[in-house]
Amino acid sequence: MATATNPAEPATGTTTVAVIGAAGKMGQRVSNNLVKSDFRTLFSENSPQGQELLRGLGRDITEGTAAAAEADVVILAVPDVVLGTVSEALVPVMKPGAVLLTLDPAAAYAGLLARRDDIHNAVAHPCHPSVFLERTTKEEWADTFGGVAAPQEVVASFEGADEAAKSLAESVIRTMYAPVVDVHWVTVKQLAVLEPTLVETIACMVGALLTEALHETVHTVGVPEKAARAMLLGHTQVALANTLKGDNPFSDACLIAMDYGRESIVRDDWKKVFDDAELDSVITRMLRIKEIKR
């Protein structure tokens, strides 16, 4: 089993991290790990319901601009569609040399984030625990998302050549997504190709297609649900192991059925989703904007 490691030593004690949108799903997830660390963490949340939730967790609330002005790393754990507006309010008050860290690449790729020459921009997205992860405890099996018990990897981007700021960003990334096996550094564009194209446009879509296929098998064809679900879940593991790990070759009959499936379901031009224009198109739809800013 892969073991989570943390080679990037955090600057403890005096390092302050601000979580903006701390009551949201991702805000809570990253905060739950940060409060267990040596980082001084500030929590900001606009909604009254979210503020009440944070108080129930015993977390003090700091107004957004005040938190951003104090922090060495500002984490924007807010919906993608408001990242531009939120960054415009907070970036001007951030300390010189601080790191602005977002959790998805779309807004950074689209050029929506407010910029300052003396502020470092980083993006970090969790890979989630691998389907091939060797889990040994009930807690690891229960943690399908990551950030609780099951080790995961993270893909991140960092703009600029300041190694100290990058090391600080990695320390925060490893802490907020812990337990982390490794952090892989890529460009913002490469991260955008990974998320959404590879994992949302393709992998998540395939997962939804499997669910629809299960529904058809049970409710249209009439196969008992327990039998259909057992067959699908087991064969999904085999399919992934055979194709992504090369564990075993498919039979000749299976290959024929696979060709039929590709001819019947997959469009011949499907690889166009990796074109730059298609990436721009899907991100503008996701962010509800007219165009990508360069």
Image (cartoon, helix red, strand yellow):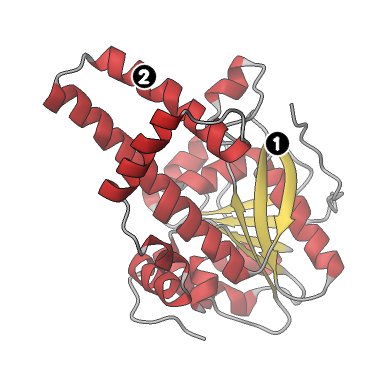
Residue 240 pos. (x, y %): 52, 34
* Residue displayed at 42% across by 36% down: 255
| Residue situated in front as seen by the camera: 212 or 82 | 212
| Residue situated in front as seen by the camera: 204 or 275 | 275
Residue 67 pos. (x, y %): 62, 62
Residue 129 pos. (x, y %): 60, 36
**Is any atom of residue 254 visible in this view?**
yes
The relative height of residue 81 versus residue 37 in the rendered view (above or below) is below
| Residue situated in front as seen by the camera: 24 or 248 | 248
Residue 177 pos. (x, y %): 65, 43
Q: Mark 1 points at which residue?
A: 179
**1 and 2 marks in contact (CB < 8 Å):** no
- Total marks drawn? 2
Q: Earlier in the sequence, mark 1 or mark 2?
A: 1
Q: Which residue of the protein is positioned furthest toward the front in this rendering?
A: 252
Can you tell which quarter of the image residue 220 is in?
Answer: top left
User: Of the residues shown, which amino acid type is indicated by label 1?
Assistant: Pro
Q: Mark 2 points at which residue?
A: 231
Q: In this view, does 62 lie to the left or right of 270?
A: right
* Residue displayed at 38% across by 67% down: 282
What's the CA distance linking mark 1 and mark 2? 32 Å
